[in-house]
């Protein structure tokens, strides 16, 4: 695949650059739903929802990350994922995420912070599962 048939992807959290490289496809969840980005995609700017970002590299390997809040921008075969928080799947402590989920779940219906904590824990667990 020629370089102009790949996406240049940068996944950045507020505190660090999480991942950069070339990819054949990016899948992310925005406030409007899940979106798949292929090379030569139309320009796009969207708010990220708490969820999983999948970056499929040219060779078939997939980078999986849990992201929490932020923005996704697409222009000229460049994808910028600017997240408030982001963790690669292999950085996630699943038992800690499971504990956070169990702790926050009982209060999620009445407490906005607990709801956010549930969504964040679920995204972390899902990212770990997808990375398999």
Image (tube, grey):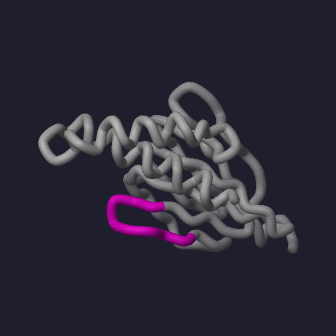
Boundaries of the magenta span: 29-36
Residue 118: percent from left, percent from top: 34, 45
Question: Residue at 47% across / 51% down in the picture?
Answer: 123
Q: How many marks?
A: 0
The quadrant holding residue 7 is bottom right
79 or 31, which is in the foreground? 31
Residue 45 on image: x %, y % = 43, 57
Please indicate whether residue 120 sits to the left or right of residue 116 in the image.
right
Please give left or right for residue 70 compared with residue 92 in the image.
left
Q: Main secondary structure of the magenta part?
A: strand
Q: Is residue 30 inside the magenta stretch?
A: yes
Location of residue 24 (image quadrant): bottom right
* Quarter of the N terminus within the rendering: bottom right
Tell whether 89 sits left or right of 71.
right
The quadrant in which the C terminus is found is bottom right
Q: Residue shown at 41%/52% (left/top)?
A: 48
Residue 26: x, y in percent?
62, 64
Based on the picture, tell me whether residue 66 belongs to the magenta stretch.
Answer: no
Q: Residue at x 57, y 42 (%)?
A: 94
Depth check: 103 or 61 in front? Answer: 103
Image x and y of residue 60, in percent: 81, 69
Rendered view: 124 above or below 59: above
- In the visual, does 111 lie left or right of 68? left
Give the residue furthest to the top.
Answer: 15
- Residue 27 found in image quarter: bottom right
Q: Is residue 43 above or below residue 52?
A: below
Q: Nearer the viewer, residue 126 or 96?
A: 96
């Amino acid at each position: 695949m020629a370089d102009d048939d790949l996406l240049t992807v940068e996944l950045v959290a507020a505190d660090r650059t999480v991942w950069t490289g070339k990819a054949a496809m990016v899948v992310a969840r925005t406030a409007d739903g899940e979106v798949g980005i292929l090379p030569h995609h139309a320009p796009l700017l969207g708010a990220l929802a708490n969820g999983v970002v999948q970056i499929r590299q040219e060779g078939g390997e997939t980078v999986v990350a849990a992201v929490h809040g932020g923005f996704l921008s697409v222009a000229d075969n460049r994808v910028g994922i600017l997240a408030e928080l982001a963790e690669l799947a292999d950085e996630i402590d699943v038992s800690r995420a499971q504990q956070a989920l169990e702790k926050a779940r009982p209060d999620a219906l009445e407490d906005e912070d607990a709801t956010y904590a549930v969504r964040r824990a679920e995204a972390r667990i899902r990212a770990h599962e997808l990375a398999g």
